[in-house]
Image (tube, grey):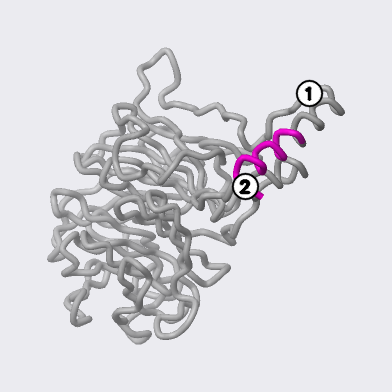
Amino acid sequence: MSCMQTLIFRLAILLSLAFLSGCVTTSPLATEIEKPVFPSAPAPARMVFERTLQSSADVEIENEESVFKRFITGQRRTGTGLGKPFAVSVHQGRVFVSDTLKRMVVAFDIPQAKFFEIGIEPPGELVKPMGLDVDQAGNLYVCDATMKHVVVFNRDGQYLRTIGNPELFSRPSGLTVDAAGERVFVVDTGGVYSDKHRVLVFDARSGEFLLAISQRGDQDGELNLPRDATIGPDGYLYVVDGGNFRVQVFKQNGEFVRGFGGIGRRGGQFSRPKGIGADAAGNIYVADTAFGNFQIFNASGQLLLAVGSRGNSPGPAKYMLPAGLAVDEDGRVYMVDQFFKKVDVFRPAGLQPEQGYLVPASPKNK
């Protein structure tokens, strides 16, 4: 059948359906959702909800035959979804998400409209992937909490090497790597009966253990149940000090610089801080599981904005169990929710949708 004949055949079916039903309804997948902005009007918008990533269907391009079949049958589009996402990191539009239930890292490549899985077989097989980060070249560093080591892959998921060993860690959970890919900072959360509440530093290429930063306590420069870390453009290490409800800031040699935050329910305070990220301007973003949001601070710890809220049902900027957070090269913010099995993406209001790395290969309805 020629292309013209196929088109005529499909148009005939559509006309028949319209005649029988009286109208042709729009697929719910094509319905535009309301995109919240922060802060809300009448204040000028500073952060805009952009999209949600939940499955391979959110990035892969659907072929014409499949689109037509769903239109006829009324079926919703499906894809390979997330099980229990934990952390997120991004390199030039490729979004990496660790999944502790599925024991893998999944990659949503929005510019190339690709979805693939990482760490599902040896070498580099993952058991409980948690914290992750990427260096400037796009190499992916994954903290495996069960195996108690860090697994390194290239941008396409090819295994490169393993860093660390179980003797060094108590309960590793988060990590960050410097842009040059020279040093990896692994957050060891520790536990009630452990004194290993600290950050371990490794040579990212040789795997050599270099130093330990901090110890358990509640004084300046001490940590209690640390959760995650990031490196700001100032080169400082920002650590989520979960048990002390604050962020502690160190030089990369371990010297304490400052801290901010504290326990409470007001803006600028924390209840269950978890993920952390930094943008190119030096602002620090901290996800809070209890608040169901992320707060944005300047490098000195002054609160700038809070984004998102708790919700009992899924929706844009609604969270039940937020965890990991990342900020990409363009300033977009990625927020993981474990309960709703999603990653929400936010865009700075000054950045247009068609700007930056996160531009789809071709437009399509989700």
Q: Residues within 10 Å of mark 1 (few under 14, many from 20)?
A: few
Q: Would you say residue 162 is visible in this rendering?
A: yes
SS for tag 2? loop
Q: Where 322 sits versus 99, above or below?
A: above
Q: Amino acid at mark 1?
A: Cys
Q: Label 1 belongs to which residue? A: 23
Task: Decide which of 48, 15 is in the foreground and name it.
Answer: 15
Label 2 to label 1: alpha-carbon separation: 28 Å
Q: Amino acid at mark 2?
A: Ser
**Residue at the image position 74 percent from the left and 46 percent from the top:** 75
Q: Can you tell which quarter of the image residue 244 is in?
A: bottom left
Q: Label 2 belongs to which residue? A: 2
Task: Decide which of 154, 322 is in the foreground and name it.
Answer: 154
Task: Decide which of 185, 150 is in the foreground and name it.
Answer: 150
Which segment is the magenta one? 1-12
- Classify residue 52 as left or right of residue 154: right
Q: Is residue 49 magenta?
A: no
Residue 147 locus on image (x, y percent): 43, 81
Main SS class of the magenta portion in the image:
helix
Q: Which mark is residue 92?
A: none
